[in-house]
Image: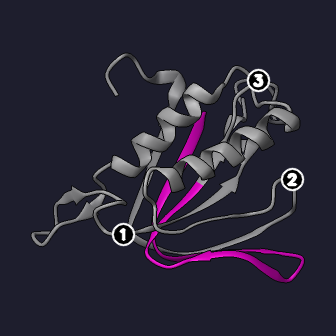
Amino acid sequence: MRALLQRVRSGSVVVEDRAVGSISQGLVILAAIGEQDTTTQVEQMASKIVHLRIFNDAEGRFNRSLLDVNGEALVVSQFTLYADTRRGRRPNFTAAAAPELARGLLEQFASTLCDLGVSSVETGRFGASMVVELQNDGPVTIWLDTDHWGSSR
């Protein structure tokens, strides 16, 4: 599983001129499921994200997690995070999971964020053409990929 986290003051997703999800302070999470991913990777990713200390404390240091700041999450499906651009000029997406698998695991990911205590979890619309708007805070942008995690997370 891959995720691109953007710490935000606000974020929203619009589909066909209609807002389908919005948050205030928290994280916009662009998320993609790989063809080999299972519930294990989804649960590991969710746990990593909610406990990752990327919010400022009183001294301005990254010392607080999404849970510590009572932040919200906006999860946006983004299979293009699996783009392979090593050959040619057109990205290859064969490492991304098939839509049937990806949809279910992304729904589980959003649900797991809730179960772990995130105050509000919103989502985009799977498979739709979406307009994602955000007010990046920092800016702070973090890339996570479960394929590169060893036994220490």
| Region rendered in magenta | 1-29
The residue sitting at 41% across, 68% down in the picture is 71
Which residue is denoted by mark 3 in the rendering? Answer: 87
Asked if residue 142 is positioned above or below residue 84 in the image, the reply reads below
Q: SS class of the residue under badge 3?
A: loop
The dominant secondary structure in magenta is strand
In the figure, is residue 109 to the left or right of 119?
right
In the rendered structure, which amino acid carries the disc numbered 1? Asn
In the figure, is residue 49 to the left or right of 76?
left
Which residue is denoted by mark 1 in the rendering? Answer: 70
* Corner quadrant of residue 67: bottom left
Instruction: Compute the Cα span from label 3 to label 1.
Output: 43 Å
Name the mark nearer the viewer: 3 or 1. 1
Q: Position of residue 101 (x, y in %)?
A: 81, 33
In the rendered structure, which amino acid carries the disc numbered 2? Gly
Asked if residue 22 is positioned above or below residue 128 in the image, the reply reads below
Label ID, residue 127: 2
* Residue closer to the observer: 49 or 107: 107
